[in-house]
């Protein structure tokens, strides 16, 4: 389609345009120049209407024809010697018992550090729980930074680029007295759910991956494509020891990875309003972060002769301005756009119409999304004032006031741009603005039909859960996988954990739990994923998509 301004033949060729143009009042007495002004106005109005008509037509066509989920699903996948997993009652009891034991070891990371004794206990537990993994000649195991684990599983075809599955051992603190229905390190079973800290973040993935490998090896499976499994021990305190040392070791060996799969997003069921059926969101990127300190210094004074403005007052206004002027809307400029486009066909009208045409409606949609904090996080870089310190004594005007702001940076923004916006919004030279630490948003991983990791994960989700729609997504939190960006261009954040309404609050919150059925599904998912990775290459796209 070319531009909407269609030239001189416009008024006479378009019926919609025509009829409206003649509604413009005719003038009986006019000069030449007035005549031509009116003609120009008429032309402009016609052009706009024609443009609107064309846009509407395209939008309508896209709404009913564009299903970006077609493609590879219809294509023929290479058949591999594929082992299927049927879990018998006896195995089921054992795999659940092992999972519960993992949850019972309090591998808590605090700001003050790790629990070395729990981490050592976890190491011993893994060796006992997965004897085949630790004794197989196909698996090379090593400890990294004392408590993290790196496994290399040898493939029979060294020319196939290996991949990496990541999970973490540590968990955030939990105290029963906060209101847990069962003690957080008890792995108590209630109504088919196992309760405990780490059941979803992230021991289900960790145990699921190792359990899948244990079963595969017992069944005599020999992978064609080699792969790695990395288990960090300090993800909850940024992964500076575990993940970063695993990266260091792999870099030293010159390893390049086809893709990395880590925790992050999940299967959302009944959580996205207006969406029919569950959606598996695969995280293509993570937001960046910046911690910024704002400070104001003034000469100290006595409260009996106060200055007109105090350091507290100046800083408070600066903070208020930051809250009242959120960062610019960037919705549609990052992969959040793809999330909606992939899910569009599962929305009812009129949402379906809007989502299918973000090229037209993203400004409208971003205004709707920004109303709620959880969806606002996809629209922009968020600003959270997290600390405010000042004052020493009731009768002293404090010389110093400090505030800390935590910003989560949208994919289309950078740390420097965020600092510039803060500077401009605060607009007061007395407020000193300092970047304490931060990192850029992660690169956006590929999700097209030639993207090996994405398509393998997608196929495995669809094999395991046929009713689910798969779409790319964004992690607003951070994971260990961000440390691996030099080893691969494609990092995905996903585990097939089912989140229903209310479940997201359990994450790092009270009553974290997973259903027994869901844990078993994770084992099956990784069991199939490892085998699906054994194809030589992706099938040729069988395109049924009529892109406009
Ligand atoms: C492997 O087996 C699973 C389950 O039986 C099946 O869904 C999947 O398509 C198979 N993968 C390949 C590559 O044949
Ligand atoms: C550390 O872990 C051990 C288990 O190995 C546990 O007994 C102990 O209570 C934990 N310490 C803290 C401070 O949580
Ligand atoms: C590993 O443990 C040893 C002794 O317990 C300690 O000296 C060393 O610093 C630890 N290494 C790391 C990377 O934590
Ligand atoms: Zn986690």
Image (cartoon, rainbow, N blue to C red):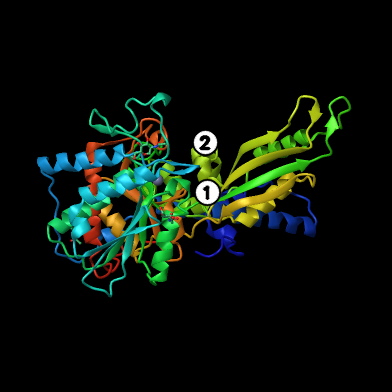
Residue 68 makes an appearance in the image: no
Q: Which mark is residue 446?
A: none
Residue in the foreground of this view, choosing between 531 and 181: 181
The residue at 25%/70% (across/down) is: 536
Report the side of 314 relative to 93 (left or right). right
Ligand 2, image quadrant it occupies: top left
Q: CA distance from mark 2 to mark 1?
A: 16 Å
Task: Give the quarter of the image for residue 541.
Answer: bottom left
SS for callout 2 = loop
Q: Is mark 1 within 8 Å of ligand 4?
A: no
SS for callout 1 = helix
Report the side of 285 relative to 436 (left or right). left
Q: Which mark is residue 362?
A: 1
The residue at 67%/39% (across/down) is: 403
Residue in the foreground of this view, choosing between 380 and 522: 522
Task: Give the quarter of the image for residue 166.
Answer: bottom left
Q: Residues within 10 Å of mark 1 (few under 14, many from 20)?
A: some
Q: Position of residue 84 (x, y in %)?
A: 14, 54
Mark toward the viewer: 2 or 1: 2
Report the side of 340 relative to 533 (left or right). right
Point out the residue furthest to the right here.
305
Residue in the foreground of this view, choosing between 384 and 468: 384
Q: Which mark is residue 372?
A: 2
Total numbered labels: 2
Mark found first going from the N terminus, 2 or 1? 1
Q: Residues within 10 Å of mark 2 (few under 14, many from 20)?
A: few
């Amino acid at each position: 389609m070319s531009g909407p301004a269609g030239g001189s033949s416009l008024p006479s060729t378009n019926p919609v345009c025509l009829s409206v143009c003649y509604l413009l009042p005719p003038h009986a007495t006019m000069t030449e120049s007035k005549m031509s002004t009116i003609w120009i106005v008429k032309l402009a109005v016609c052009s706009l209407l024609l443009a609107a008509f064309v846009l509407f037509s395209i939008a309508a066509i896209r709404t009913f024809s564009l299903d970006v989920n077609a493609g590879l699903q219809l294509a023929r996948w290479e058949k591999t010697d594929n082992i299927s997993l049927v879990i018998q009652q006896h195995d089921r009891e054992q795999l659940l018992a092992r999972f519960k034991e993992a949850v019972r070891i309090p591998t808590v990371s605090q700001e003050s550090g790790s629990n070395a004794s729990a981490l050592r206990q976890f190491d011993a537990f893994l060796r006992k729980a997965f004897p085949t993994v630790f004794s197989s000649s196909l698996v090379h195991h090593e400890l990294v930074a004392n408590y993290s684990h790196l496994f290399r599983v040898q493939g029979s075809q060294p020319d196939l680029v290996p991949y990496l599955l990541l999970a973490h051992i540590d968990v955030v603190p939990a105290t029963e007295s906060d209101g847990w229905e069962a003690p957080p390190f008890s792995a108590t079973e209630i109504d088919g759910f196992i309760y405990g800290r780490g059941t979803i973040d992230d021991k289900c993935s960790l145990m699921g991956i190792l359990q899948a490998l244990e079963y595969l090896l017992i069944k005599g499976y020999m992978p064609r494509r080699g792969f790695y499994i990395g288990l960090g021990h300090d993800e909850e305190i940024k992964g500076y020891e575990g993940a970063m040392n695993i990266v260091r070791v792999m870099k030293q060996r010159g390893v390049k990875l086809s893709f990395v799969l880590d925790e992050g997003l999940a299967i959302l069921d009944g959580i996205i309003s207006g969406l029919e059926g569950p959606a598996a969101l695969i995280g293509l990127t993570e937001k960046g972060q910046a911690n910024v300190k704002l400070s104001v210094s003034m000469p100290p004074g006595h409260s009996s002769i106060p200055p007109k403005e105090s350091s507290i007052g100046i800083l408070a206004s600066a903070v208020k301005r930051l809250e009242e002027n959120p960062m610019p809307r960037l919705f549609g400029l990052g992969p959040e756009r793809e999330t909606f486009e992939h899910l569009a066909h599962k929305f009812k009208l009129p949402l379906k119409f809007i989502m299918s045409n973000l090229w037209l409606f993203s400004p409208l949609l971003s205004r709707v999304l920004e109303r709620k904090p959880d969806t606002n996080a996809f629209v922009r870089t968020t600003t959270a004032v997290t600390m405010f310190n000042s004052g020493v004594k009731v009768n002293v005007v404090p010389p110093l006031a400090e505030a800390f702001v935590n910003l989560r940076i949208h994919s289309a923004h950078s740390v420097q741009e965020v600092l510039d916006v803060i500077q401009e919004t605060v607009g007061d030279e007395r407020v000193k603005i300092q970047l304490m630490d931060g990192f850029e948003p992660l690169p956006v991983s590929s999700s097209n039909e030639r993207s090996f990791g994405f398509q393998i994960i997608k196929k495995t989700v669809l094999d395991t859960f046929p009713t689910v729609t798969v779409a790319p997504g964004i992690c607003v939190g951070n994971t260990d996988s961000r440390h691996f960006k030099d080893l691969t261009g494609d990092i995905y954040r996903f585990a097939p954990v089912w989140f229903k309404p209310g479940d997201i609050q359990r994450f790092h919150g009270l009553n974290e739990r997973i259903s027994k059925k869901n844990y078993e599904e994770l084992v099956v998912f990784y069991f199939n994923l490892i085998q699906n990775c054994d194809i030589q290459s992706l099938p040729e796209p069988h395109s049924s998509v009529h892109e406009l």
